[in-house]
Amino acid sequence: MFAGFLLTFLTAALVAASPMQKRQGGPSARVVTSCTKAGTAALTFDDGPWVYLYDVSKALIAANATGTFFFNGNNYECIYDADQAKRVLYAYQKGHQIASHTWSHADLTTLTWDQIHDEMWKVEQALQKIAGVVPAFMRPPYGNYNDLVRQAAYVRGQTIANWDFDSGDSVGATVAQSEADYTSLVNSHPNTILALNHETYETTAHQVLPFAIQKLQAAGYKLVSLAECVGLPAYQSVGSPGVRDSTWHC
């Protein structure tokens, strides 16, 4: 009886441990900011699923390219809404990589341990229900992370993925500015490229992306998924999509 009480007490104490206690020691997730496979470029797209996903996918597929989509759970709209869920499944079935951009696009560095996990597991659960996969990569909103975020990602089996080139679309860059930045990037010809874009902008989908694809391929880059360009698995597990039920809501 006493042993059972003691085990319950110790378990409760561990669960109640403060974020500061969890931050002291413990393994941390790997952080990638660039590709490792020479001659590759990974075009990544944040903040979806959104209405321009189809056009982004079609532009990539027409060029025999693969993209990576970092999805939120409840940012612009709820990921479980019929149209949103359809976009998630479409991207996956077209061969693109899908990954986590957290649930609500909160700055994870401002959250507690439990809140960070909540932001992560909710979108992981949604991707498993909708597409049947558990992502192996997560991108923290704004690219912001700290030791606590890295430890939480490690516990969840995820690699943190940022970037080494930003198209600038989310901070007000015009089409001309984004295209000029892609041109400068290609002219400097780095060994690899990991590019940040956002599928939520019409100009990105219809103007900047086609330009970038043409420039990058003309320079000899192979346009691949993030997982391929860093040589890691895209998913922790792969199964079948779930069946919509009462749990599919935000």
Image: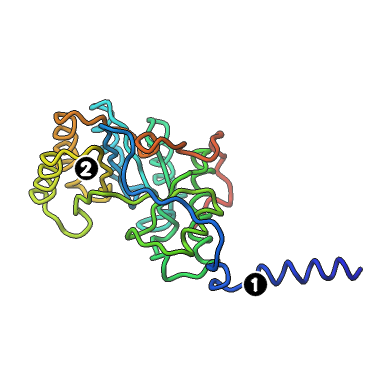
In the rendered image, residue 41, in percent from the top left (x then y), is placed at 26, 37
For mark 2, give the secondary structure.
helix
Residue at the image position 9 percent from the left and 51 percent from the top: 177
Determine the image quadrant of residue 189: top left
The residue where tag 2 is placed is 205
Q: Is residue 96 above or below residue 134?
A: above
Nearest to the observer: residue 186 or residue 92: 186
Tell me the quarter of the picture where residue 102 sits: bottom left
| Image position, residue 220 (x, y; %) | 18, 28
State the residue position of label 1.
16
Above or below 9: residue 247: above
Farthest-out residue, right: 1
Position of 18 with respect to 185 (left or right) is right
The quarter of the rendered structure image containing the N terminus is bottom right
Gap in angstroms between the C-alphas marked 1 and 2: 45 Å
Q: Could you classify mark 1 by the number of other residues whose Cα lies within 10 Å: few (under 14), some (14-19), or many (20 or more)?
A: few
Which residue is depicted at the point 22% across and 31% down?
221
Viewer-side residue, 3 vs 51:
3
Horizontal side, residue 146 vs residue 172: left or right: right
Residue found 55% across the figure and 64% down from its top: 25
Give the amino acid at mark 1. Answer: Ala
Going by the picture, which residue comes out furthest to the front? Answer: 25
Measuring 54% from the left and 52% from the top, which residue is drawn there? 156
